[in-house]
Image (tube, rainbow, N blue to C red):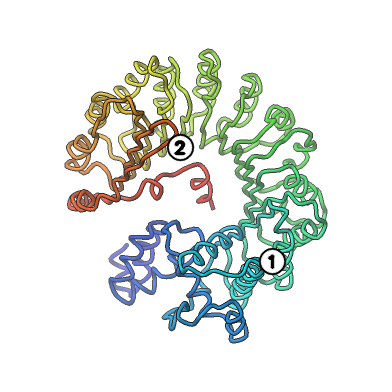
Amino acid sequence: MSSSKIFSGDLPELIYEIIEYFQNDYSTLHSCILVNKLWCRLAIPLLWENPFSITTGNYNFIKVYLYNLNKYLKATLSKYQIIDSLLTSNTLFNYPSFIRYLNIDNINTSINMWLRANDITLNMDLVFEFKNFINMSLIKLFIENEVNLHTLDLEASNTNYDTYIENILEIILQNPNFISNNIRNLKFSISSSGSKIVNRVTQIINSNQNLKKISLISNTNTFLLYQSLLLSKESNCSNTLNTIIFYYINFNGINNLDKIFEQLNVLESVHIIFCYSLDSFIQQIIKLTKPFKLKSLFLLMRLQIESLQLLLQKSGNYLENLGDCLNYNNLSSDQQLLQLIINYCKNIRFLDLHSRINDITSSIFSLIENIKQNLNYLSINLSNYEDNEYSNIKSILQNLGQTLPSKLEYLSLVLRIKENDIEIFLKNSQDNFFNKLVIKNKKQEDDNYIDILPYIKEYVMRKKRVKYLAIENTLIRGCVRRKVDLFDLKDEVKEFKLHNIKVLSYNELSIGVYRFLNEID
């Protein structure tokens, strides 16, 4: 199949499929640019589709955008003492046209970091005015380029920025083509009760004809607004929306949840992330006459075992992402919870055990064994144990390697390493392959120092058992933390590279719940 495409002249298509695989691997994408003109032309759009969220610490893309402003807006920059030497003199591509993901809050952060990196200081009276000007100019620039925006992240959580948010929303509404047909994902948080902001957000949602995903964040106002929209006859969401993500929503006092979900005709996944008053939420959800396709559940607070059982009975077969569930500090509750997951959840692919772990090691291994046919992402945090619990942690590390699936896309271990436990784990898992292996060793001041790197080299590097690797050592002395990242040890990075293992920084390779869910299309 591939060879026929090559001979038929579709080589660029195949190359793009390869390069697209590195969509979030920015260093590899930079390397692709240097191969030849074709690879450069294919990789550049991927590098520039979401520049405000790239955590490389380089914010020079701001000056590239400013270069593309029209003459009037460029002239206005002189009022703020922005000199020509700070702007790019020439560009090879129309970079603004490539943006697909727009996070309003990240724009603010990027502008602040760019000003700091270039030692640009402004009169205090001009700071807000200047930032507002840059923000408005960038939004106008993207609109002028008729970008095909995929995701729009609107946050109005700080009432001090109400005027700024109002201006952005007004510009967007004045250009309905910017959002009406292209945006599939909308993420917003509203703490302001200002009628202008609420009305503008309502108009944006109602004007969108193809909204597939919506994320609701932080406060009841956000959900109540969307609740009214879903129950409105003007909204088209009931026939387009297939994904809802709830972040930190307090469901206390929120009614009619069953009515809302009943009228969402194409809903395929619901994700609940660290929400409050879930007992109230569950009592309404179990009334649904249609399936409730709960794909993610990350718990923040104690949930009644009876309520959790009702939820898993309703949605356990759909659940794929589960985390932070062992937060009871109660052996009986932890065992009951794990047993419920074992009984009802067979399709878990992302499991995050981030909590105090008591004497429940056998239940943990039973859970992993029960879901290993689907398990692809596993994160275990054992760093908060007390010294008197160490035997349980030691047992987990010693037996984990024998329980894991033969291949994992991602394995993360956050722990306090003592003695040679990491060697035992690596020995017992030496038939396993991890595409991404992430280790954070959090050592207390009184811990015996264990250098894990020799073990990693012997059992991982030389056997080429990973593709991407990140290791961070953190020494904790009271309130002071000192971090050493393997990525900063250039000679070690080169050695791993000789074995076709790419070392990345811990922050770049570590996949938390937010990053994982942001990749959901």
Tell me the kind of residue under disc 1: Ile
Q: Secondary structure at mark 2?
A: loop
Residue 470 marker: none
Percent position of residue 521, x then y: 54, 53
Residue 168 marker: 1
Percent position of residue 282, x then y: 69, 29
Q: Residues within 10 Å of mark 2 (few under 14, many from 20)?
A: some
Task: Reply above or below: 281 against 512.
Answer: above
Percent position of residue 28, x then y: 33, 60
In the displayed structure, does residue 23 sit left or right of residue 212? left
Residue position for label 2 = 349
Task: Reply above or below: 418 against 137.
Answer: above
In 3D space, how far apart are the residues under numbered discs 2 and 1 (Cα atoms)? 38 Å
Q: Residue at x 67, y 33 (%)?
A: 276
Q: Nearer the viewer, residue 226 or 442?
A: 442
Q: Nearer the viewer, residue 338 or 199?
A: 199
Percent position of residue 19, x then y: 36, 63
The residue sitting at the bottom extreme is: 71
Mark 2 / mark 1, whichever is N-terminal: 1
| Badge nearest the viewer, 2 or 1 | 1
Q: Residue at x 71, y 71 (%)?
A: 171
Tell me the kind of residue under disc 2: Arg
Q: Residue at x 74, y 56 (%)?
A: 236
